[in-house]
Amino acid sequence: MKISELQISQVNNQIQALRKAGSFYGKKLEEAGISGVSTPEDFEKLPFSEKSDLRDAYPLGLMTAPEEKIVRIHSSSGTTGLPVIIPYTAKDVDDWAIMFARCYETAGITNKDRIQITPGYGLWTAGIGFQNGAEKLGAMAIPMGPGNTDKQLQMMIDMKSTVICATSSYALLLAEEIQKRGLRDKICLKKGVIGSERWGEKMRQRIRTELGIELYDIYGLTEIYGPGIGVNCKYETGMHYWDDYIYIEIVDPQTLKPVPDGEPGEIVITTLVKEGAPLIRYRTHDLSRIIPGECPCGSKFPRLDIIMGRTDDMMKIKGVNVFPSQIEEVLREFPEVSSEYQIRISHLDGRDTMRIYVETNGSVSFADLSDRIAAKVKSRIGFTPLVKVVEIGVLPRSEKKSKRVIDERYE
């Protein structure tokens, strides 16, 4: 989707603010002699911004509005290097709440719903984003935060929560506990709003079936407000994103040139009206595609496909590039295995080894299943992994994001 004239004028406002503030990107623009853009082609020549730029700006080098207008900061949940600190003005906080309320509405959630919020609060954008959106919608927010599954289930039953907001890992953990404890008839959940990590179709099916709810993918990242910049509707034909607040391009991760709508690549986001820390052409490293055409729901907002993975998810094993999503696709063909898996990569006796741990119930031969999965991976990817089959429930469950790939070569 080419950038529109209105969006170009909004980008120019952002460029002026960045240059005036002398933030890292403002300096970049000044050095390149850029004071504005007038065509889509001009826009595509603007320099990208990267997470490393944002880290280099620590602590408040991203601040573009005057300090007296900054009402809050958030920080990325990353565990490596310096955190990224994002300042917000009151308008940024309100804009984010408006987008989030739109996400709830797109999922068919109303002010009569009771929304149980399990993602974390604090510097992370998740919990408070879900809460601000619920309050903007006028729904009842139940701000539980993560963990304490006993208390989560008690509140879910006593408060008759109708919506659960969670990572897919925690939604699965709750679904399994509800099943185990025989609580299915006592819960009133109708919908789940799930974000923060990529999740496969098998996991989606398990959560949907075990909880008996509709599921909605929510998209966002701390650097660009937080969760709430896009969500899928009931037709499940991709996530609508709010192009009056953000402009999305899909670029080839190698050439960094924009690709046509419908083709996969890396998501690059420009904020159009953000005040505290505007970002232009921010490389997310998330992989997806823009879905062309109109959605059956009638919304005019453009659509992004579900997140397929990240450019930095790629594992190089025995000279072959492998993405976790490829392993997931293979495992999807085996109805005997659960949605949970773990990949461990090690370097033994001078060569790389991949071990895949999968779960199944006791009704199948573990050895036979292991051989069949290994053969399928070999035919699909080109080398034979070691497949270890374990009983359902053995692999770790998480209240946050599940760690599915453990690369022991670099530990």
Image (cartoon, rainbow, N blue to C red):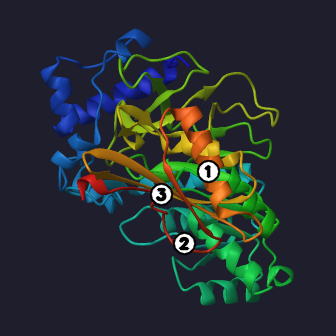
Measuring from the top left, give residue 158's x and y in whole percent.
75, 89
Question: On the rendered structure, is 143 left or right of 162?
Answer: left
The residue that mark 2 highlights is 397
Q: Residue 404's mark? A: 3
Element under disc 1: helix
Asked if marks 3 and 1 touch (Cβ < 8 Å), the reply is no
Closer to viewer: mark 2 or mark 1: 1
Q: Residues within 10 Å of mark 3 (few under 14, many from 20)?
A: some
Q: In percent of the image, x 34 and y 38: which residue is there?
A: 279
- When asked about the image quadrant of residue 27, the answer is top left
Look at label 2 and name its amino acid.
Arg
The residue that mark 1 highlights is 371
Q: Residues within 10 Å of mark 1 (few under 14, many from 20)?
A: some
- When asked about the image quadrant of residue 255, the answer is top left
Q: CA distance from mark 3 to mark 1?
A: 21 Å
Outermost residue on the left side: it is: 31
